[in-house]
Image: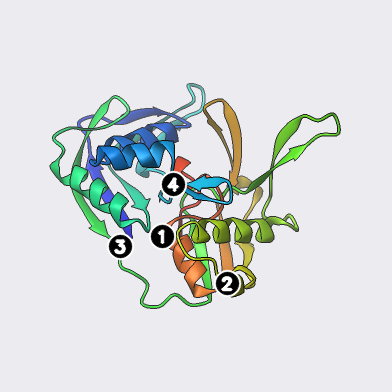
Amino acid sequence: MRMMLHFVSEEPLDLPINYQDLLIGFIYRNISDEAYRRFLHEEGYAYRGRTYKHFAFSRLDGRRKVDLERKRIVFFPPFRLLVTSPLNAFLESFAKSMLLSDELRIGRYPVHLISFEAQPEPAEMPDAVRIRMLSPLVIYSTLTNPNGVKYTYYYRPDHEQFSRKVGENLKRRYFSLHEEDPELAASPFLIRPIRVTPRDKVVTRFHGTIIEGWMGEYELRGDPRLLHWAYHTCLGGKGSQGFGVFELI
């Protein structure tokens, strides 16, 4: 399910350009079930040696002003945030906290929830959709230099391996909560850039690490079960760090 949260604040939010860490903290603080919060933060759902959180969120959406000199971004109320997950335990705990909490904060700023709604489900997910990214799509591999030093390689949307890597990532995340299906695992998947320009490249610093991702519009083709899963989680990696959320066009 996808939840749109609408907020106001008494003053504008003056945040660092790379503010997704503040949103991560906001989400974890507002998972009311302490044991589940600890499990999600410290463990997650495992599949073939990798772990997944199975929630994601968009950027803040609202009137804003970017101050490049100070490397800050100011959001003027009201503003909104999309949080998405296929996990009932996560959604129930998070919604409960949203409704009952007397004090919500994004960073040092108190914010007030004025409304939230579950976004309508697609009547039936087709096997081909057009999407627009709401937060950057990130897909990468960890490679090793000839001298033995490991490094992270981020794929551009025009890279020949981009579509295959996004599809493999999506299937791994799906099978971390579903029984493996060899036919689904072997099913074709395609993501193709439709309207993506160099200006859609987004470089983010997260905990000292540089992350490269891409906004823009894309075509997705694949099994409707996988596309539905992507819609309620994300595309690519690092969804729980604020990447890969999209809307249907």
Q: Which mark is residue 53?
A: 4
Q: Which mark is residue 119?
A: 3
* Marked residue nearer the N-terminal end (4 or 3): 4
Taking the image as drawn, is residue 249 in sight? Answer: no
Q: CA distance from mark 1 to mark 3?
A: 11 Å
> Looking at the image, which residue is at 56% across and 52% down?
236
Examine the rendered structure and indicate whether residue 92 appears above or below residue 210.
below
Foreground disc of the pair 2, 1: 2
Q: Amino acid at mark 4?
A: Lys
Q: CA distance from mark 3 to mark 2?
A: 27 Å
First of labels 4, 1 by sequence position: 4
The residue that mark 1 highlights is: 232
Residue type pointed to by label 1: His
Question: Where residue 152 sits: x, y (%)?
Answer: 69, 37
The secondary element bearing badge 3 is classed as: loop
Question: How many numbered badges does the structure rendering display?
Answer: 4
The answer to which of 121 and 69 lies nearer the viewer is 121
Say which amino acid is labelled 3.
Answer: Gln
Q: Is residue 5 shown to the viewer in this render?
A: yes
Q: Nearer the viewer, residue 25 or 203?
A: 25
Q: Residues within 10 Å of mark 1 (few under 14, many from 20)?
A: many
Single out the residue that lies furthest toward the right. 146
Say what amino acid the circle numbered 2 marks: Leu
First along the sequence among labels 1 and 3:
3
Q: Secondary structure at mark 4?
A: loop
| Distance between the alpha carbons at the discs numbered 4 and 3 | 21 Å
First in sequence: mark 3 vs mark 2: 3
Numbered tag placed on residue 184 in the rendering: 2
